[in-house]
Amino acid sequence: MKLNRRQKITSTIAAGALVFGASGVAWAYFSSSGTGTGAVTTGHAASVTVTQDAFGGGNPAVSLLPAGPSQPIGFSINNPGAGDVHVAQVAVAVAHDVDGNALDQTGTAIVGCLASWYTIAGSPVTNSSAGWEVAAGTSVDVLYSASSVTVSLSDPESSQNACIDKQVRLIYTAS
């Protein structure tokens, strides 16, 4: 079918209008603006736990004696959470009651065995001031040789018989 001059002009104008209209829509789309809202939930770090390594197997067991050798202490920092955490330091202390008696592993006072007779050296441990990065669901071992924490029993020149064969509770505080 042949178009006459008038039909050709009309078709050309219609096509031009269509192209111009489409470009106007595209221009309006690209220069659009607006606002909106949304929300995210911020999680929290789970509390880490510190577990003392068992003596033996490279961590020598030393029976504490008044003015005797000190016992090196190793431990693990455990992160049960879903996110990585940074632990700057771990402090170690002897647990005691209000009267200064050391506590045993069950939390019972060892009456007559004073916590002040035990000396914790090298606490807090800081990993050369860098702390530790503990990935989610993992543990970091701080070997006794790297922790530099030791415990010893002083000699107050009085009877320490109440301490004989007792396991004194140590408290680990990670921060």
Image (spheres, rainbow, N blue to C red):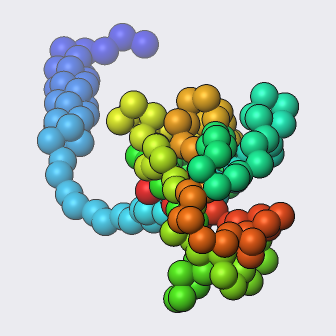
**Residue shown at the point (39%, 65%) measured from the top left:** 39
* Above or below, 130 relative to 49: above
Pick out the residue farthest to the bottom: 98
- Residue 32, position in %: x, y? 18, 47
Count of marks, rendered view: 0
Pick out the residue farthest to the top: 2
63 or 105: which is nearer to us?
63
- Residue 92, position in %: x, y? 53, 56
Is residue 105 at least partly visible in the picture?
yes
Question: Where's the C terminus, which quadrant?
Answer: bottom left
**Residue shown at the point (83%, 36%) measured from the top left:** 56
* Above or below, 57 relative to 46: above
**Residue shown at the point (59%, 50%) measured from the top left:** 67
Q: Is residue 45 left or right of residue 10?
A: right
Image quadrant where residue 172 sits: bottom right
Q: Is residue 105 left or right of residue 49?
A: right
Image quadrant where residue 23 sits: top left
Question: Where's the N terminus, which quadrant?
Answer: top left
* Above or below, 25 relative to 79: above
**Residue shown at the point (78%, 28%) measured from the top left:** 58
- Residue 174, position in %: x, y? 50, 56
Pick out the residue farthest to the front: 157
159 or 47: which is nearer to us?
159
Is residue 48 at least partly visible in the picture?
no
Q: Is residue 167 left or right of residue 173?
A: right
31 or 23: which is nearer to us?
31
